[in-house]
Image (tube, grey):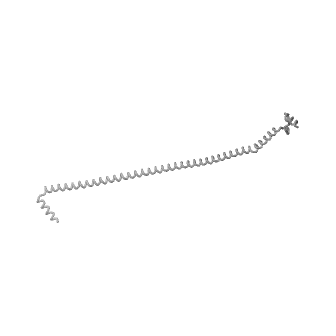
Amino acid sequence: MRDTLTILATSSEYAEPAAMGLDSYQWVGLAMLVLIGVFVWKKVPGIVTGGLDARIAEIRQQLDEAKSLRAEAEALRDEYVARIANAERDAEAMMDGARREADAILARAEEDSAAMVARRERMAQDKIAAAEREAIADVRARAVQAATAASGQLIAAKHDREADAKLADEVIASL
């Protein structure tokens, strides 16, 4: 028996197991390919589709967020456009009100100045009239004084005692 083992050990040819014409290393390789194929078929498409679905959901969420942000931005823009329009209308109304008020103040000032000029004119005319009356009264008083003084001098010059006595007698007789 020793000889048989020795012969088998020394011989370089010995039989390898084979099935359906494939050697053992080929069966191992085939089994690995099937195993990898099953894993790939079951897991990789699921992982890829799951990753793509997650990315699609993330992109949809970002798009929805972008749409909502755009809507908010448009709403803010519209609000500020409305505010600007209101502010412009308010400013225009304020300017119109200020113009009307300034025109009214100017008209009132013109009326007041015209009334004041008329009042001062009347006052000046009244002062002039008063000065004229005073001057006329003064002239009359001086004329009376001058006439009295002149008549006194004329009477003194033309009337003597006899004329005075005669005049006194006439006045007494008329009483």
The answer to whether residue 157 is left or right of residue 100 is: left
- Furthest residue to the bottom? 175
Point out the residue furthest to the front here.
2
- The quarter of the picture where the C terminus appears is bottom left
Q: Position of residue 166 (x, y in %)?
A: 12, 61
Give coordinates of residue 131: x percent, y percent: 27, 53
Q: Nearer the viewer, residue 119 or 93?
A: 93
Say which quarter of the image contains residue 150.
Answer: bottom left
Residue lying at 32% horizontally and 54% vertically, measured from the top left: 123
Quadrant where the N terminus sits is: top right
Is 145 on the left or on the right of 115, as rendered? left
Q: Nearer the viewer, residue 76 or 129?
A: 76
Seen from the viewer's position, the closer of residues 54 and 8 is 8
> Which residue shows up at 26% across the image and 55% down it?
134
Q: Nearer the viewer, residue 99 or 82?
A: 82
x and y percent of residue 104 in the render? 43, 51
Quarter of the rendering containing residue 174: bottom left
Horizontal side of residue 38 vs 148, given as left or right = right
Task: Name the residue located 63 percent from the left edge and 47 percent from the top edge.
Answer: 65
Q: Is residue 23 left or right of residue 94?
A: right
Find residue 152 and report its horizontal and vertical position in percent: 16, 56
